[in-house]
Image (spheres, rainbow, N blue to C red):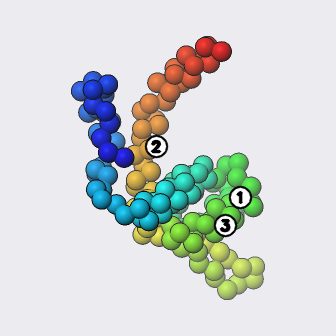
Amino acid sequence: MGKPNESVFTAEELFRAQSYKARDYPKNVAPGVENMAREMISGFADKWTVVILDTLWDEGTLRFSELARHVEGISQKMLTQTLRRMERDGLVIRTLHPSVPPKVEYRLSPLGLTLGAAFCNVWIWAVENHDAVHEARKTFDRKD
């Protein structure tokens, strides 16, 4: 992901795109690292991971049931699977308190905090560009 083809964009469009970008893509990335980065991004960019990151960012430490209430529309199975993957990837910290019934809490890890900050720019982009996306969809749908 280098620079965009500048000849097809206006200076204003390029400036606006740069406002969402914190850093340049690193040069000379080893192929193995490149492949792992692609795998990581495909796992992080799913619907539920982003919502869970955002929820834990906003709410802090939550019990499983509290998290389920905050993440509207997610099934218990999908929440469990997503949290397990996020824990495996080092994005959340799961704390099991020995009690009856067992109390399990989740919070962002330092790694999850950095990913949440990176995704914040995606949320900002979505909020600022929702009208343009809506219009693009309407234009596309009229073609059919």
The image shows residue 19 at horizontal and vertical percentages of 29, 39
Q: Nearer the viewer, residue 97 or 77?
A: 77
Q: Residue at x 32, y 52 (%)?
A: 25
Q: Residue furthest bottom?
A: 98
- Marks 3, 2: nearer the viewer: 2
Instruction: Name the residue beneath numbered marker 2.
Output: 123
Residue 38 image point, x, y percent: 49, 56
Q: Earlier in the sequence, mark 1 or mark 3?
A: 3
Q: Earlier in the sequence, mark 3 or mark 2?
A: 3
Q: Give the image location of residue 47, x and y in percent.
A: 60, 49
Name the amino acid, label 1.
Met
Q: Which residue is pictured at 45% across the width and 57% down the height? A: 116
Amino acid type, label 2: Trp
* Above or below: residue 134 compared with residue 104: above
**Residue linked to disc 3:** 64
Label 1 belongs to which residue?
78
Q: Secondary structure at mark 3?
A: helix
User: What kind of element bears circle 1?
Assistant: helix
> How many numbered badges does the structure rendering display?
3
The quadrant in which residue 101 appears is: bottom right
